[in-house]
Image (cartoon, helix red, strand yellow):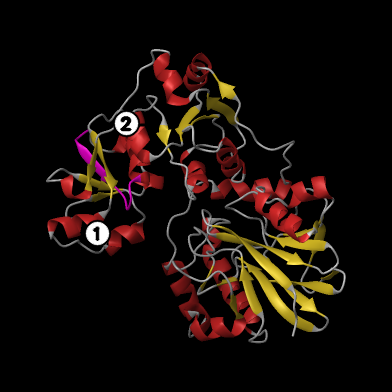
Amino acid sequence: MSTVDVLPLVDEGLGNSAYLADLGDGRALVVDVSLDLRAARRAAARRGLRLAFAADTHLHADFVSGARQLAATDGARVLASAAGRREYRHDGLRDGDETDLGGLRLRALFTPGHTHEHLSFLLLDGAAPVGVFTGGSLIVGAAARTDLVHPALTDELARRQYASLRRLASLPDEVAVWPTHGAGSFCSAPPGARRTSTIGAEKATNSLLRAENEDAFVAALLGSLGSFPSYFRELADTNRRGLVLPGDPVLPGLDVDRVRALAADGAVVVDARPAADFAAGHVPGALSIPLRPAFASWLGWLVPADRPIVVVRGGDQDPAEIAWQAVKIGRTGLAGELDGGLAAWTAAGQPVRRTPVVTADGIGGRPVLDVRQDAEFAAGHLPGARHRELGRLDGHELPREPLVVMCGHGERAMSAASLLEQAGHRDVTVVLAGGPTDWARATGNALVTGA
């Protein structure tokens, strides 16, 4: 039995796992690692390993790959699909190609579907298959979405995904399954799913692997797809070119006058403080995106790629974490941060805006705007609630009536309120604590299900 050490490096915010494999000779392979290489470097340093190989299963849409960065700074050898036509030096692999890792071998398996050029990587110890890095092909309990390349190709790619999953299912039952996308990923994974699995476990439990035929598979897969962040349309091209940072990203300090000038010239002021702090007072026109694991996804969804970003943060928030979250999804236009935070803004005599808040049991009979995802809304919402996903919210389309905005916990609702404020809405209240289930519990009323 193989004793190959493969360590998942989980990004809870993106719902993804990269992997670090100890090659047994002081070197390591990393698979699907993002541009935020901090976790991979820490894991390698603890084991005394050099990051010698960087493999990408596909042209990622949800994060910037760290492969080209590792090639530039660590001399890593990049392994990726030849069909991806990457514009930097790499080993362009085709189906069946093998790479000698120094005792272990990595075999490329062409598994299109999630993307047109997708590879899975089968790790072999001698002749024995140990595990397979499945990227966005077979994932725990599901398969990754097929609508990211182009809407017109969604059905075709779903059919190719069907064939790819059947191919992977032909591997021995004991082979480990190491997928990139997992619970919390907008690339489609069931909530609460385990991060890794085996071929045998997936054959026994994954409903898509047990679909009667190709048409049934396609219907089930496409029927499960929800919305995804708009920045997903940008990053495949970014990853085809590759991105190298000149150094760790930073947030230079900006004085109040500079922040005002940048905002007047089109910069987006992103307030990363907790929602309650934003409610208590914020720079007028600022966009609330509280720093939490999902910060990167919402930053990419709500802030256009061509707009400079000015950050307002709390004194206890790590500026490096904010900067890394931004650059790993391609938001490299970081102008800096408001030096001294909101206190400096108010000390300079600048106006602040406040957002009224209530708890779930304080809504009363006011009109409600629910900004959760479609599936969340359908699972249970307040009677009469209007629905618009946060990522699709356009405040200019909504009537200028009083609104109570809610989500599940308050962070997305505060983001929505800040977008409404930018669009000229003034009578907006946010449910800061709790969601529909809390309202039902507090009032004794039933939620409504369905779209």
Q: Is residue 329 left or right of residue 29?
A: left
Image quarter in which the N terminus is found: bottom right
Quadrant of the image occupied by residue 94 = bottom right
Q: What residue is rendered at 67% in x and 84% in y?
A: 171
Specify the principal SS of the magenta part.
Answer: loop
Coordinates of residue 343 in the picture (x, y in percent): 42, 22
**11 above or below 331?**
below
Mark sitting earlier along the chain (2/1): 2
Question: Which mark identifies residue 141?
Answer: none
Q: Nearer the viewer, residue 442 or 218?
A: 442
Quadrant of the image occupied by residue 113 = bottom right
Q: Which residues are magenta?
A: 400-410
Indicate the secondary structure of the residue bearing disc 1.
helix
Q: Is residue 360 left or right of residue 245?
A: left
Q: Disc 2 marks which residue?
A: 280
Q: Amino acid at mark 1?
A: Thr
Disc nearest the viewer among 2 and 1: 2
**359 above or below 273?**
below
Q: What residue is rendered at 56% in x and 55% in y?
A: 150
Coordinates of residue 220 in the picture (x, y in percent): 44, 74
Q: Disc 1 marks which residue?
A: 437
Q: Nearer the viewer, residue 387 or 194?
A: 194
Q: What residue is rendered at 83% in x and 51% in y?
A: 89
